Image: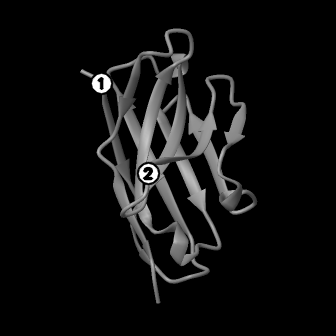
Amino acid sequence: QVQLVESGGGLVQPGGSLRLSCAASGLIFSNYAMSWYRQAPGKERELVATITETDVITNSADSVKGRFTISRDNGKNTVALQMNSLRPEDTAMYYCNARHRVRRYIAYWGQGTQVTVSS
């Protein structure tokens, strides 16, 4: 049974930092590209960043470039999202996603962790 468990969300003031983590189990982690998505109330889910199984990073949201960094640890089966210079518009539920590197129709989601940026 595949599980993705996110942690690290919370309430932070504008300009602050948070580090999200996603722990994966039940899959061969090195066979999966890992991504972070987010969904704000009333908005569609958007891709924040992806790191492939070969550590190639793709940041899909222009709004996070230079502020957010994705990383992975294949030895610990974890993926992290370091978020700096947080803005109120970063407030959202953040989700971890795993997608198989070849059979890309195989994908899994975590339950999400809430990030709220507010003074």
Q: Measuring 61% from the left and 37% from the top, which residue is drawn there? A: 50
Which SS class for mark 2? loop
Residue sticking out furthest to the top: 103
Q: Is residue 25 above or below residue 40?
A: above
Q: Separation of disc 1 and disc 2 at Cα?
A: 25 Å
Q: Which percent across, then down, holds residue 100?
A: 49, 17
Residue 58 lies in quadrant: top right
Residue 118 lies in quadrant: bottom left
Q: Measuring 48% from the left and 24% from the top, which residue is drawn there? A: 99
Describe residue 73's horizontal placement relative to residue 54 as left or right. left
* In the foreground, 19 or 60: 60
Describe residue 8's horizontal placement relative to residue 83 as left or right. left
- Residue indicated by mark 2: 44
* In the foreground, 101 or 8: 101
Residue sticking out furthest to the left: 1
Residue sticking out furthest to the bottom: 119
Q: Measuring 56% from the left and 9% from the top, which residue is drawn there? A: 102
Labelled disc at residue 2: 1
Q: Which percent across, then down, holds residue 31?
A: 53, 16
Q: Which percent across, then down, holds residue 69?
A: 66, 52
Describe residue 98's horizontal placement relative to residue 30 as left or right. left
* In the foreground, 61 or 118: 61
Q: Is residue 97 above or below residue 114?
A: above
| Amino acid type of the residue that numbered disc 2 sits on in the rendered structure | Glu
Disc 1 or disc 2, which is closer to the eye?
A: 2
Which SS class for mark 1? loop
- Disc tally is 2
| Amino acid type of the residue that numbered disc 1 sits on in the rendered structure | Val
